[in-house]
Each structure stands twice: as C-alpha cells, then as structure tokens.
Image: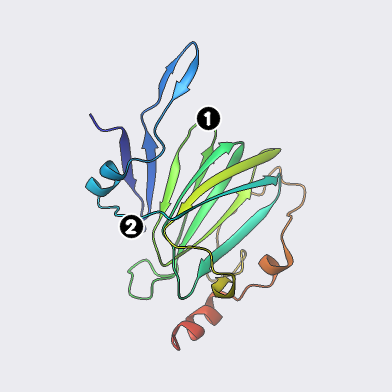
Amino acid sequence: MNKFQFTVTPIPGLYVVEQRIFEDERGYFMESFNRKEFMEAGLNADFVQDNQSNSKKGVLRGLHFQWRYPQDKLVRVIKGEVFDVAVDLRKDSETFGSWYGCILTDNNKKQLYIPKGLAHGFLVLSAEAELLYKCTEFYHPEDECGILWNDEDINIRWPLDGIPALILSKKDKDWMGFREYMIRNDHL
C-alpha cells in the first residue's frame, strides 16, 4: 500500500504531496519522504541539502531560484501555516509565467514538490511558521536570483487579509520583474 498521494497541479512537474498519517492516542507517525515511492511517481529527486526556516506572521520570502544550479525542492510546514507559491520560469513550458499556490500547515501536513525551473516563495499566515525543505542542489549564494513577489505580469493573489503589514528582506523587495527575467533568460 502506497504511503503517498501525488496530486497533479496545473503546472507540469509541480505536485501536492500527501502522506499517510498513522494516529492514535500517543500522537502520530508519518514518512515525509520515501525515495522508492517518489521514483515510482516519476520524481527522481536526489536530495543533497535540507533547510529549515522560521518566520513570523506577515513575512514573505521569495520568489527565489538559482540560475546555473537549479533545485528541485520538497517543502513542508512543521509549525504554523503558510501560503506556498511556485512560478513556472521554464520558457519551453506551456505554463510559462503561471503560478500555483496552496496552504501548507502543520495540521494538513501537505508538501509541495517543486521541480527545477520554478521560482518559490511563501507568506506566513500564522503567528509563526517553521518550514523544512529538501533541495537537489546545494545553495550557491553567487547564483541566487528572484522575481519580485508582486510582479503585475505574474499577478499572484496573495491572501493578505489578516496580515497587518508585509515583512520583506531588502533583497526580496529588489528582485527583478518577470519581463526583465524574460530578457535576461534569452542571454543564458
């Protein structure tokens, strides 16, 4: 019996991953990753790095990607609630420039599998949130890049109700727009 359900999203290669949870009066147990089952689903990810972040309500991180060292990511929330977003930056994709977002929480235990070529970001909706994410490539600070979180061409509908003020890093305020990405991507 499979322990994972892989739900296709409108963006090819991007999946919502749900796992079987074994609960009783003591609490719960679950596998968050199983290489064999992921490979059977066509997700041949060789994860090399695990990351963890903690953020408070209103923090928006993203939309991040690496140019030369792209990463597949498996993202999950272990505390709190976030609106997690992926944007398709693959020029040869029929969903180029499209975005998909979903709520990840410590209660629903859903994960988002984000393939190479997609930018990633999230908005913290709870008082605090902790995320864990696996990556198939190491972080290369010189290769880090991003798309502006509120780019009008992408037009992500962030759930801002109940968020008193957004908290962004200077870097996340200054990323390029989607049109600039398209121009720069032509030269890679």
Tell me if label 2 and label 1 are in contact, CB under 8 Å.
no
Q: Residue at x 33, y 44 (%)?
A: 7
Q: Position of residue 152 (x, y in %)?
A: 58, 69
- Mark 1 — residue? 107
Q: Where is residue 49 in the image (x, y as percent from the top left)?
A: 48, 54
Q: Please determine whether, in this image, residue 103 is positioned above or below residue 94.
A: above
- The alpha-carbon separation of the residues under discs 2 and 1 comes to 25 Å
- Specify the label residue 13 is tagged with: 2
Q: Residues within 10 Å of mark 1 (few under 14, many from 20)?
A: few
> Looking at this view, is 126 or 130 the one in front?
130
State the quadrant of the C terminus: bottom left
Is residue 154 visible from the viewing direction of this image? Answer: no
Q: Please determine whether, in this image, residue 105 is positioned above or below residue 188.
A: above
**Amino acid type of disc 1?**
Asn
Q: Residues within 10 Å of mark 2 (few under 14, many from 20)?
A: some
> Looking at this view, is 109 or 97 the one in front?
109
Q: Position of residue 113 (x, y in %)?
A: 40, 51
**Amino acid type of disc 2?**
Gly
